[in-house]
């Protein structure tokens, strides 16, 4: 069974440029998460989707970050414009959605460097 | 506020046993997770505890005491491939995962 797929794996951009990350969750998983992880820290939740509905986006900096999951399957996270402090690993995770305490399965992440 | 504490770094010897502790203060409790994360890779699920006691899974065991807000991950017969960061995460009353910063485990021959 394929795991969570993310692309690109690495991205280097100049500050003020836009960037987008893509995630395809495990087949059949209804819940999708976007996290940000800085070096030596745990993941920080940005947004959680149940199917196509964003049920928790309280930690998403909405002035520059946006996300969508139009058909309830794959998802895109966008930053526009990027700032130096956005350099981090962006992780996507999915869970079956059968229960609130579902185990989350992570993709390999996108390492973003903003110059 | 919500807080997860775990040691920043630990060192152990190949073949030995190591215990990684995690203490937590969260608004509500709906279970505690341990994840393993190798450098540059995604976190992978190790264990889930929601009731007090010890859960054993091969060389890895996880213990929970809800009254003490405490958990530990026990790794036996350490192998070099166990060198990684170990993340403790607690699910709060809103079913949101609160993550610790992780413990970097270094295994020496």
Image (tube, coloured by chain):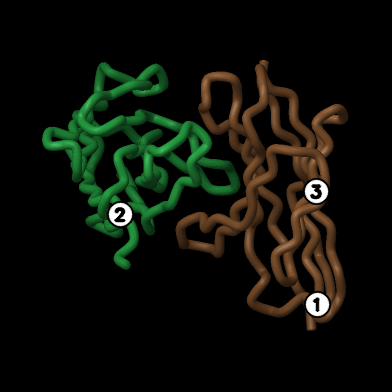
Chain colours: A green, B brown
Q: Chain of mark 3?
A: B
Q: Chain of mark 2?
A: A
- Identify residue for label 3: B63
Expressed as whole percent of the image width and height from the top left, the position of residue B38 reads 55, 64
User: Where the C terminus of chain B falls, by quadrant?
Assistant: bottom right
| Cα separation between marks 1 and 3 | 18 Å
Report the mark closest to the observer, 1 or 3: 3
Q: Residue at point 20% right, 30% down?
A: A52
- Identify residue for label 2: A26
Mark 1 lies on a secondary structure that is loop
How packed is label 1: few (under 14 Cα within 10 Å), some, or many (20 or more)? Answer: few
Q: Residue at point 80% right, 60% down?
A: B74
Q: Residue at point 74% right, 48% down?
A: B8
Q: Residue at point 52% right, 58% down?
A: B44
Total marks drawn?
3
- The relative height of residue A24 versus residue B27 in the rendered view (above or below) is below
Quarter of image, res B99: top right
Please give left or right for residue B1 compared with residue B96 in the image. Answer: right
* Marks 3 & 2 on one chain: no
How packed is label 3: few (under 14 Cα within 10 Å), some, or many (20 or more)? Answer: many
Q: Earlier in the sequence, mark 1 or mark 3?
A: 3
Residue B100: give its label: none
Mark 3 lies on a secondary structure that is strand
- Identify residue for label 1: B77
* Marks 1 & 3 on one chain: yes
Mark 2 lies on a secondary structure that is loop
| Cα separation between marks 3 and 2 | 29 Å
Q: In the displayed image of the protein, which residue is found farthest to the left?
A: A71
How packed is label 2: few (under 14 Cα within 10 Å), some, or many (20 or more)? Answer: many
- The relative height of residue A95 versus residue A54 in the rendered view (above or below) is below
Q: For the residues labelled 3 and 2, say whether their Cβ atoms are less than 8 Å apart.
A: no
Expressed as whole percent of the image width and height from the top left, the position of residue A14 reads 23, 43
């Amino acid at each position: 069974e394929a795991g969570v797929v993310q692309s690109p794996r690495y991205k280097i951009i100049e500050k003020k440029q836009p960037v987008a990350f893509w995630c395809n969750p495990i087949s059949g998983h209804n819940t999708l998460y976007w996290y940000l992880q800085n070096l030596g820290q745990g993941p920080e939740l940005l947004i959680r989707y149940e199917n196509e509905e964003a049920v928790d986006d309280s930690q998403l900096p909405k002035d520059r970050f946006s996300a969508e999951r139009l058909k309830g399957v794959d998802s895109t996270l966008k930053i526009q414009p990027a700032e130096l402090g956005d350099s981090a690993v962006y992780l996507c995770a999915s869970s079956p959605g059968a229960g609130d305490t579902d185990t989350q399965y992570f993709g390999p992440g996108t390492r973003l460097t903003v110059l | 506020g919500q807080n997860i504490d775990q040691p920043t770094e630990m060192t152990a010897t190949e073949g030995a046993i190591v215990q990684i502790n995690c203490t937590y203060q969260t608004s509500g409790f709906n279970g505690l997770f341990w994840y393993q994360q190798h450098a540059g890779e995604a976190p992978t699920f190790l264990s889930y505890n929601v009731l007090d006691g010890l859960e054993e899974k091969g060389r890895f065991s996880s213990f929970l005491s809800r009254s003490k807000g405490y958990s530990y991950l026990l790794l036996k017969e350490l192998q070099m491939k166990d060198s990684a960061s170990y993340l403790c995460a607690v699910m709060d009353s809103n079913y949101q995962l609160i993550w610790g910063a992780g413990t970097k485990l270094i295994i020496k021959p």
